[in-house]
Amino acid sequence: MAEPINNREKRIEMLKEIITGLHEGKSEEEVRGQLVELVQRTDASEIAAMEQELIDGGLPVEKVMAMCDLHSQVVSEILVSRPGDPVVPGHPVDTFKKENAAIREEVQGFRAALAGVLSGGDEEMVALDSLQDRFNGLMDIEKHYSRKENLLFPVLERHGVTGPSKVMWGKDDEVRQLLKGLGEALGAGEASVGEWKVIEETVAEPALAAIEEMVRKEEDILLPMSLDALTAAEWGEIWEQTPEIGYCLVEPGDEYELPGIEPGLLGIEGSEPTKSGGEILITPTGALSFEQLKGIFSVLPVDVTFVDADDRVRFFSEGAKRVFPRPKTIIGRKVQHCHPPASVDIVEKIVSDFRSGAQDSCSFWIEFQGKFVYIRYFAVRDGQGEYQGTVEVTQDLTEERQLEGERRLLQYDS
């Protein structure tokens, strides 16, 4: 065994075999001995590489997601912790870790408040208030997950890391659904102690355990792997865009400084646009300067995103009230990687039908965070009918749905 575990490729291959066996029915006890010996020289990047190779080998993301919790629990207990370079307060990894510590505190606080509710007595109302406060804190996780999915994952993809990101995004969505169910249970009204016990066992604890499991995956695998893979400029790019999404439960440190190398679009394949304010775009119906064009897109009451014929995001508008966040890290990214696993099939179907000419447009409308959102997709073709890409147009129509009658006199909207 000594020779194979000294070779990275063989360690990854053996990890695949052991993990596959674990999910084919072998007990944890059967594989634990092999894993203990193997992971003495294994780090987080090799666990991620193992997941990547399983997906590249044809295993569906959904199956790897199903395997993920079990093998991460076994591996995390014995995974070698390799000291990395320290990060200063305010570095994206430092912020992620501080947020994870705060998330753990919220989970424990929720459990303590729920225990108070289950105990009944005079303190039950106080415990109920605390329970709702803790739940509100847990809902702040959305900012943490959104930064991870929209800022960190796109940069990891530049380094060939796509599989683990898809798996983790899918697990994030599972946490979101569990929290949604927990919120519905908390909002259902008064409940007896017996009913609270059922809520604890069937709704609360699965949600809390999933949150803790995600914290462990990030701490043991995602963040160490990211520190190894990303450059200083790429961390600067992530840091620069982080405030647009926001922070989860904590305020970031202030010692981190933007690297001297300018971040932004430099690391993205094929994305070095010329941005000269003096340039004029001449079209068959008129001409606009770059600044005029940018200003038009900034005030339009719609969000516009363009995906080219190679399925890469090439442009999005920057309106003041975007419905969905669009960090600059998505420029140059495959559109399939910009969606959670559950919706990738729909994206593939739209792009395929547009490319083949079978369809030219489609529409969706959803309720999202109290808004009525209308989403439309249009195939873009040149004068010869050749497919050039897809435009996504998103609009918040909440106010428009309430319009009645007519308005013919001037009245400014505040």
Image: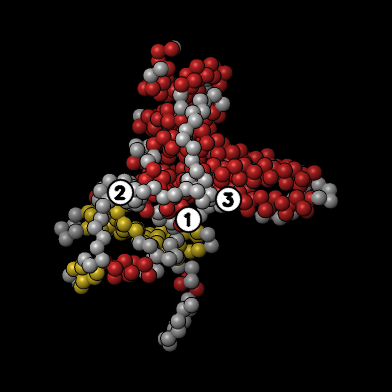
**Which residue shows up at 69% across the image and 45% down it?**
109
**Which residue shows up at 80% across the image and 44% down it?**
119
Given the image, on which type of amino acid does mark 1 rest? Pro
Picture layout, residue 218 above or below residue 39: below
Given the image, on which type of amino acid does mark 3 rest? Val
Q: What element carries label 1?
A: helix
Viewed as shown, does residue 216 lie left or right of 387?
A: right
Mark seen at residue 250? 3
Query: In this figure, which residue is indicated by the disc labeled 1?
Result: 243
Mark seen at residue 266? 2
- The part of the image, by quadrant, that contains residue 152 is top left
Q: Is the C-beta separation of discs 3 and 2 under 8 Å?
A: no
Between the C-alphas of marks 1 and 2, the distance is 20 Å
**x and y, in percent, of residue 186 in the image:** 67, 52
Q: Earlier in the sequence, mark 3 or mark 2?
A: 3
Q: How crowded is mark 1: few (under 14 residues within 10 Å), some or many (20 or more)?
A: few
Between the C-alphas of marks 3 and 2, the distance is 30 Å
Query: Which residue ends up furthest to the bottom in the rendered image?
Result: 409
Q: Residues within 10 Å of mark 2 (few under 14, many from 20)?
A: some
Q: How crowded is mark 3: few (under 14 residues within 10 Å), some or many (20 or more)?
A: some
